[in-house]
Image: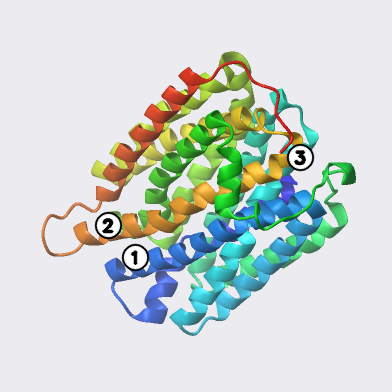
Amino acid sequence: MALIVFIDMVGIGLIVPVLPGLLEEITGESLDRTAEIGGWLLFAYALMQFTFAPVIGGLSDRFGRRPVLLVTLFMLGIDYAIMAWAPTLFWLFIGRILSGIMGASWAAANSCIADVASPDERGKLFGILGAAGASGFVIGPAIGGVLGEFGVRLPFIAAAVLGIGGAILGYFFLRETLPVERRRTFTMARANPLGTLIQMSRNPIVLGFIIVIFFMQLAGQSQMSVWSYHTQLVFNWSELDIGLSVTLFGIIVAFVQGGLTGRVIAAIGPERTAILGFLLAMPAYYLFAFAQSGWFMIVGIVFGGLGGLTFPALQQMMSERVAEDAQGELQGAIASAMSITSIIGPLIMTATFGAYADDTGLFFPGAPYLLAAMISLIGLLIAARNIRRMGPKSKPVRT
C-alpha cells in the first residue's frame, strides 16, 4: 500500500516545478497571469476530487480497496499522458479534471490502515502512509526539476509511465485489506459529499475535527498554489531550485510522519500531538510572507514540515470514533473537506498573489502566506476547543 501511494505522489510531484513553464508555453501569458490560470486548473482538479472522493471511498467499502486503487492509478497514468500531449489550454483542463477524479483514491488508500490496524496503532500507520506520500514528493519534484531543464513536457511523460507502471506493479503485489464480510452496499445517497458529511455530523467530535482539517488545508493551499510563482518572481528560482525546495519539504514531512509521529503520539497522546503540530507549522507562514532571501524560505520549510504531526493525530482520533464498516466513508468525508479547500483555496491564494505581485498598488507577493497564517490560527483555536469537549471514546455504532 505504501508503495502505491509513493508511486502516486512521485507522479504528482514530477509536474510541480514545470507547470508554470507549460502554462507560459501554451498561453503566452506573463507569470502573474499564468498563476491565476494555474489557480483555475487547481480548481477543476479539486472540484472533481470533492465530488468523487465519497464515491471512491464508498466503492472501496463495497468492492474492496485493491480494485479501486489499481483502476484509479492506471487512469492517472493516462491523464498525465494527455497533459504531456495537450496542445491547448482546453486539453490541459481535460487532463486536470480526469486527474481530480482518479486522485480521489486517497480515501481508499487511507481506509486500508483502518482495515488492518487496531485503533491505538492507526495514528502511527497513518503517519507512515503519509511519509510514503511525502517521500514521493521528495523524489518527484527533484526529478521533475531536472527533467524540466530538457523540456517542460518531459516530466508529464515520466509521470504517465510511473502511473501505468505502478498499476501493473500493484496488480501483482497489492493485497486486499477489506474482508468480504465487512463490506457493505454502495448507495449514492451516502456516497456524495453531502451524504458523508451528514453521516459524520452524527458525531460532533468527528465533525469538529473535519472542520479543523478544512482550515488547516485551506492555509496549506497557499504553498500549493503560489510557491512556484512566488519563488520565481521574488528570488528568481529556476525549475530545479523549486523542485529541490519541495523535495526538502518532502524529506522533512517523511521523517516527521514516518519516524516521529508514532513516538510523539505514544509519549503525549494524539490530542497534544495535534496542537503541537499546529504550533510548529504556524511560524512557517510568517517566514514565507516576509522572506528577504531564499534562506528564509528554507527555514520556513523546516517549520512547515514539523507541522506534519497534526494530520495523523487527527486521523487517529476520528477513526477511533467511527464504526469499522464506515472507515472508507470517514476517509471520503475527510477527502471531501480537503477538496473543498482545493476548490476555493487556489482561487483565493492565486488571486491574492496576482493582486499584490503586479506593478500597480502595494507590492507584497507574500500576501497569500500572511492570509494563511490567519486561517491556520482559526484552525488551531477550533482544534483546542474540540479537544476540550472530547470525553472518553464512545463505542462506535455501525451506520
Residue 353 location (% of width, % of height): 27, 57
What type is the residue that disc 2 sits on?
Answer: Phe
Q: Earlier in the sequence, mark 1 or mark 3?
A: 1
Residue 176 seen: yes
Residue 353 image label: 2
Confirm or deny contact between disc 1 and disc 2 (CB under 8 A).
yes
Residue 350 location (% of width, % of height): 32, 59
Mark whose residue sits in front, 3 or 2 = 3
Q: Secondary structure at mark 2?
A: helix
Residue indicated by mark 3? 325
Q: Secondary structure at mark 3?
A: helix
Q: Secondary structure at mark 1?
A: helix
- Quarter of the view holding residue 123: top right
Q: Is residue 289 left or right of residue 159?
A: left
What type is the residue that disc 1 sits on?
Answer: Ala
Q: Quadrant of the C terminus?
A: top right
The one of 328 and 13 positioned closer to us in this rendering: 328
Q: Residue at x 25, y 62 (%)?
A: 354
Residue indicated by mark 1? 35
Residue 143 seen: no
Q: Earlier in the sequence, mark 3 or mark 2?
A: 3
Label 3 and label 2: CA atoms lie apart by 43 Å
Confirm or deny contact between disc 1 and disc 3 (CB under 8 A).
no
What type is the residue that disc 3 sits on?
Answer: Asp
